[in-house]
Amino acid sequence: MPDFTRFLKLYARHRLGVLKHQDPVETQTRQLLGLVRKARGTRFGRDHDFDRVRTIADFQERVPVRTYEDLWRDYWSGAFPDLSGQTWPGRAPWLAVSSGTTSGATKYLPVTPAMMRANKRAAIDVAVHHLANRPDSRPLSGKTFMLGGTTALVDQGQGILSGDLSGIAVKGQSAWMRGFSFPPPDLALLDDWEEKLARLTRLSLQERITMLTGTPGWMLILFERLHQLTEGKAPFPDLELVVHGGVAWDLYRDRFRPFLDQTHAETREVYPASEGFIAVADRGDGEGLRLILDNGIFFEFIPLSELGADRPVRHWVGNLETGTDYAIVLSSNSGMFAYLIGDTVRFVDHAPPRLLITGRTSYMLSAFGEHLIGSELDAAINRAASATGLTVREYTVGALLPESRGGVGHHLYLVEATEQPDDERIARFAATVDQVLQDMNEDYRAHRINDAGMNPPAFRFLPAGSFERWMAMKGKSGGQHKVPRVITDATKFATMVAELRDGTT
């Protein structure tokens, strides 16, 4: 197989020079005005007087923040599936199907040719930053293993196809790249995750795999099964880069180490969303993800305290603050304008802007006014795991409301670890989580004082494989599907608790 790394290195030298001299404010202003100019003839553009938008302030004055439900009701539902001219000129040939992990509602998000080109450029940026940190690496000397969902797409009519964004990306892949990609098309089409994984593990051992991309939980299952076949030997000795995203890496870092230590591969976190490619790690693990400023997306950030306000304060790279938790709002070349995507972030740098993903707006656990965010929950679980010597595979948490009037509710955590702890370790685990959250979050601490607003959290440790089987039962095995960290809907959480308790998984 030819090695095209040398061509990638030439591009990387140019791209890194551009990024070094990039002005965030000027770049983002240019992105927004370009998007407005492109969409001014659409129904959305006419409704919001895009012809008169000259500045960021003009845009924010004319275009209110919207959710998916708002855009679907006002612009997309009546034209579905062909959204031509609604919020973006021309046809969106694909619709990315995205399920809210807590709401379960199916979303159909337009994917335009411009967005596909932008996503490809962002994917190359991942390799560029890898080479900046590992200049002797040869990532294109072998194949890239893309552990995604099925590439089978559904014909919605009028020539519009819908499916997983990973499947759409494979369909839109350049012909020359297919020889450098794994799995082959016939295997990528499979939607039976167990059959697909069994065939992937065996066939991949015959390939020179130099890059692997996917969601951490499913990649870990892949590695574990590969190790069974190789009897503990390195399955991919030539592995150079593992690209991960979608969930917090802290839960998985130590569990990946035995596999990665058998290679010289590095890990690099990315922040792709169904709405667009947002950020990529340009430094080391845990040092923040660099916002991609010049790739067809204009970013705004709403402080979490402003969510739900009629006219929330809308920051952008010109006035964002470090250390503040924001909800992301984006306008993009797929026809989304001032769109609240549901993720929360915190910035650690201004120039260039680097962020940490702190969770989702739907992952805010506040049944009693405790206002916990995803990063706080992850940190508490990680600290408890260290304190008890447990390795947590997955967890979900929800609130159990008081059974009687005047009673006090509590949080229930469903945890799957690599071993079943005894009662003493469970008690220590629970006490650690409770204390860490009190130390990190004033609202939580206020509710926990003397059990006035909340009782201590409860923990139920599940048998190995419980979450994997539960996801399979829900038809969400593999690909971009993730175990929900927080379930805010009391009925859905109660159903999940019952299913896992009764062994229906």
Image: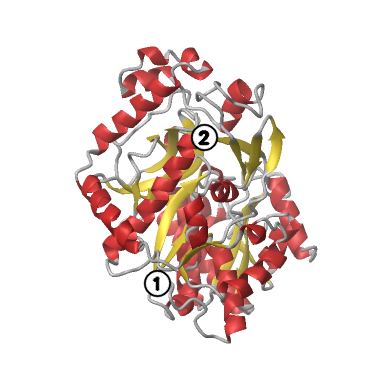
Label at residue 265: 1
Instruction: State whether residue 442 is above or below residue 34.
Output: below
- Of residues 147 and 353, the one drawn nearer to the viewer in this rendering: 147
Q: Depth-wise, is mark 2 or mark 1 nearer the camera?
A: 2
Label at residue 209: none
The amino acid on which the numbered mark 2 sits, given as a three-letter code, is Thr
- Of residues 480 and 385, the one drawn nearer to the viewer in this rendering: 480
Residue 223: x %, y % from top left: 55, 74
- Of residues 479 and 106, the one drawn nearer to the viewer in this rendering: 479
179 relative position to 418: left or right: left
- Of residues 69 and 5, the one drawn nearer to the viewer in this rendering: 5
In which quadrant of the rendered view does residue 22 lie? Answer: top left
Instruction: State whether residue 421 is above or below residue 294.
Output: below
Residue 357: x %, y % from top left: 43, 51
Q: Are marks 2 and 1 in contact (CB under 8 Å)?
A: no
Question: How far apart in space, not on screen, are marks 2 and 1 (Cα)?
Answer: 34 Å
Instruction: State whether residue 189 is above or below residue 22.
Output: below
Point 63% across, 27% down: residue:
82
Residue 203: x %, y % from top left: 61, 72
Instruction: Please indicate, yes or no, whether residue 80 appears anywhere in the rendered image.
Output: yes
Mark 1 falls on what kind of element?
loop
Point 39% across, 35% down: residue:
296
Point 52% across, 85% down: residue:
233
Kindly identify which residue carries mark 2: 112
Image colouring: secondary structure
Q: Which quadrant: the C terminus?
A: bottom right
Q: Earlier in the sequence, mark 2 or mark 1?
A: 2
Mark 2 falls on what kind of element?
loop
Instruction: Please indicate, yes or no, whether residue 461 appears anywhere in the rendered image.
Output: no
The amino acid on which the numbered mark 1 sits, given as a three-letter code, is Ala
